Structure formats: structure tokens, C-alpha cells
Image (tube, grey):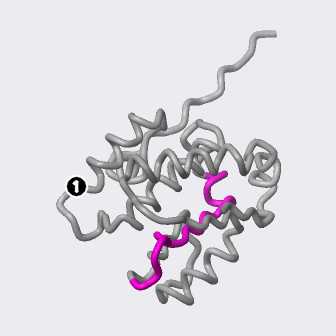
Amino acid sequence: MINIDPPSSPLALDALATLHKSSLARFVNRARAAVRLEGEVEVLLTSDAEVKRLNKAFRGKNKATDVLSFPAPAEIPGVAGDLAVSLDTAARQAAEHGHALKDEVRILLLHGLLHLAGEDHETDSGEMAEREAELRRELGLPHGLIERASRPKTAAPKARKQRA
């Protein structure tokens, strides 16, 4: 199930109309199958403030982030876990990388699903990055989180002056 709380940033609020629960649910199911993750996944699309609260409560980090993954305990059958995505951060990242909010949310969902499946780019030797890139191509997504983090940032293209 996908729950959408209103984001707090004007950028995210403006783009919110482009997100459709049914389309995102279909994507989660496709991505879950591609990741080979069994069990239901609950998704919360929310604000930076709520993600910050969750991050502090569960990870001891007092800051917002783009996606949080909460794997379900093994003794809960049929449930893979929960994902929380900050729509505020997703909207900023989408604008920064030049693609739609729906694409950024899908990138974040894929990243979170890989974490629910036990992958961890902070401790592995690049396996999660390779898997994310492979699945991103398979699912038709732009550059993934790990790939973006490892590339040097380039300046945004300057606006062209119009001739009068």
C-alpha cells in the first residue's frame, strides 16, 4: 500500500499531482519482482520533517534523507518491510538531475527495495551499485542514487540569453 502525506516544500507540492498511487503501486510490484523481494511492502511518501523524525527515532540521525528502509522481522511472514520517501528531498533531487518527480520517487523506491532485500552499499564492495544500475536500466529509470553519488558534480547548464 502507498500512503501519501502532503510534502512541505512548494516545489514538491506543485509536482505532487504527477504522482498516482496506482502507477506507483504497479512500479513497486514490478521492482519488487525484479529485486526478487518476497512479501508486501508499505510505502510512505511524506515530508522532510517526517523523514527526519523517523531517521532520528530509528537510526539516531537527526536529519532528513531521501529514503529510509525498514526491513520486517523474519518472524512476520509475507511482509518485506516499509519504505519512507521524502517528497521534499525527491523534488529537489529531481530538479537537480533534470527529470520528473515520479522518476525520482521510483529511483528512491528501487534503492529502498534493494535495502529491504539485504543489500548495503555502505558495507559491500560495489555489488549493490552494480545491481541498482542493472535494475535501473531494466526498469527504464535515470541514474540511480549510488551512481549519482560516485560521479563528480557538474555545473548546471547556463540559461541562454535571448536576442531582442
Residue 14 lies, in percent from the top left, at 82, 48
Residue 127 lies, in percent from the top left, at 22, 55
Image quarter in which the C terminus is found: top right
* Amino acid beneath label 1: Glu
Disc 1 crowd rating (10 Å Cα; few below 14, some 14-19, many 20+) is few
Residue drawn at x 74%, y 15% as measured from the top left: 162
Residue drawn at x 50%, y 84% as measured from the top left: 61
Indicate the secondary structure of the residue bearing disc 1: helix
Query: In the image, is residue 158 part of the stretch drawn in magenta?
Result: no
Residue drawn at x 78%, y 50% as measured from the top left: 16
Residue 67 lies, in percent from the top left, at 53, 65
For the record, the magenta segment spans: 75-92
Query: In the image, is residue 77 part of the stretch drawn in magenta?
Result: yes
Q: Quadrant of residue 97?
A: top right
Residue drawn at x 74%, y 46% as measured from the top left: 20
Instruction: Determine whether 113 is above or below 11 in the image.
Output: below
Residue closest to the eye, 121 or 89: 121
The residue at which mark 1 appears reads as 127
Residue 93 lies, in percent from the top left, at 58, 50
Residue closest to the eye, 21 or 46: 21
Drawn side of residue 155 relative to residue 130, left or right: right
